[in-house]
Each structure stands twice: as structure tokens, then as C-alpha cells.
Image (cartoon, rainbow, N blue to C red):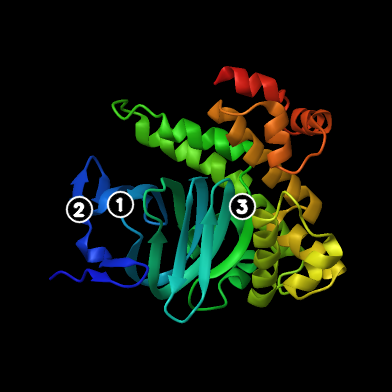
Amino acid sequence: METKQVTAKWWRISSDELQCHQQNNCLHQSLPDDLGAGRSAIFQLDQDLSYIETRYTPSKDLAVLSRIDYQEPRLVVTLGLKGQSRFAEKNGGEVVFNEGYTSITTLRSSVGERQYQAHKPTMQLRFALTKNWLDRYFGESKTRQLFNKNGIQLLSYRPISPQAICAAQQLLNRNEARETNRIFMHGQIMSLLAFELSPLCEDTCRNPAEFNQKDAAIAKSARDILVSEFKSPPSVEELSKRAGTNQFKLKKLFHHFFNNTPYGLLLEIRMNNAYRLLESGQYQVSVVADRVGYSHAGNFSAAFIKHFGVSPKAISKKH
């Protein structure tokens, strides 16, 4: 039965309407042809660990309705490799998954929708881990406190580590025909998870109950301000006031959720935007410097080299 619905903003379909077929121990899901390009590959590596590759470029602003009800709670690690998506819960909660960031969430049951913008490519890698998997590697006493709420809960939001990016590239470039492919995938995934889960576990061990969902919302609000105003950003004092907290608390929230300072995250945002502009080959270094908030191209170049280990001109010439 079709459940497609059109609202003022989103074209909604049920997850049951995705086209599915099984091939080589992998479940493939794809969007109906009239909704653009969209596919996911789901690998169940063992009973406690699954890996999902998602690539979507819908032709409409799309919302895929989803009802999740696990017997055992899950921790989900999402790497945003391209674009942005949003999970909006029926009860009003939401989590945004952005390019360049690893989001770690927990859930047992949830009703909501995954939202994708029209004509904007999105690529994400997701790793779903049961509590049993986490208990096995980190111990029950350390992981019990992660699963204290129903619905979806954002535990961590940080830039993807360089080591995880390397492992992700290895995963995406794997040789499917190789007999040891499944072992290779498992090895790369375990390496990736070791890097991305380590800061979360360290924070949890230090102070398990220090931050809550309201704190996560404050941190997200401040981050969103920096993302939209990175060219002329507010001071930390002003940013704190706009996000609804004080400077001391905001710095603690940035350290916990982003493993960074407000200035450090601003630098990440500026440098990542600059890299994309240079990579396009359409802009001179001086223009890119101005577009990301630098008055002097020399200062921009110095910051870029320190951040990426390569000059802006080298990126521009490469493309």
C-alpha cells in the first residue's frame, strides 16, 4: 500500500516502500525511481554489529518515515562524508548529521523520519552496535550509563578523526570479489570504531552525568551559529549569550561534545569551507581567504598550511 504524502516542505514515504534485495550477505535498499538516486547497503557483520553505507541524492525534499523498536538498545556511530541529513522524532527531538563530523547516538525505540534535501548528495557510513558489543569491549559498568533514555539521544558530535577517514576510504575502496573481503571489512571497521569511540568512553568515565540533552541542544545551537556566521563570527561572550549559557559552560560543552574550543571549531569550519572552494578550482587564494573571513591572504595561507600541512595554492593547482 502506498503511503506517499506531500506536505508544504517534505515528500514523505514509509521505509516499507524502499526497494529491497539481498545479495552476497548484504541487504540493498533503494528509493523508488521517481524520487531520484538513493541507496543503502546493509551488512550484518555479526549479531551485535552492523554496517550501513548510504548514498542519497533525492529529486524532492524527502522524508523517509521510520519506526525503530529494538529488543536491545543500540549505539550508532554516523560518519558524515558528504552533505547533510536530519532525523526528526515524532515527539519533537532531532539530530542533524553533517559532513565532516562523527555523531554518536543511542536509541532503543523511536518513531520519526530521516530527511534529505532535494538534489543535494548525501553520503554517510553508520555503525550500529548493541549494548552486548559495548559490554564486551568496554565493560558493563562503563556502558550502562550510556543507555538511560528512550528515543534518540545525541552523546557526541566531533570532527571525524584523520584515522577514521583513512579507514573509511579503505572500506569504500574494498575489493568485493576478494574471498577475504568480509575479514578486511571487519578489520577496518574495528580500527575506525576504536578511534571514534575512544573520546566518548574517556568522557563517560570522567563524569558520566555532567551533561544532559539540554546541554547538547545548547552546544548544537552555538555550533550552528558558527556554521552560518563563520565569516564574521560573534565573540565567545556573545556566542554564549545567544546560545543561552555563560562562557565557562560553553567552553566545557564544546570540549565534551566537539572535543574542541569555540575558536578551534570556528577554524575547522573556515578551513573546511576554504578547502572545498579551492578544490573547485574556481577561486583565487585571495578570494577564498576573504570568503572565509580573513582580511589578509597571507594570514589565511599560514593558517591553512598549519591546518592541512599543504598550501592553498597546491590544492587549487591540483584541481
Mark 2 or mark 3, earlier in chain = 2
Asked if residue 287 shows in the view, the reply is: yes
- Disc 2 target residue: 34
Q: Amino acid at mark 2?
A: Asp
- Disc 1 target residue: 59
- Disc 3 target residue: 197
Q: Nearer the viewer, residue 149 or 54?
A: 54
Question: In x, y percent, where is residue 316?
Answer: 62, 23
| Disc 2 to disc 3, C-alpha distance | 38 Å
Q: Which residue is located at x 37 percent, y 51 percent? A: 46
Mark 2 or mark 1, earlier in chain = 2
Q: Secondary structure at mark 1?
A: loop
Marks 2, 3: nearer the viewer:
2
**Is the C-beta separation of discs 2 and 1 under 8 Å?**
yes
Callout 1: few (<14), some (14-19), or many (20+) C-alpha neighbours within 10 Å? some
Q: Nearer the viewer, residue 66 or 284?
A: 284
Question: In x, y percent, where is residue 260?
Answer: 76, 52
Marks 1, 3: nearer the viewer:
1
Q: Secondary structure at mark 3?
A: helix
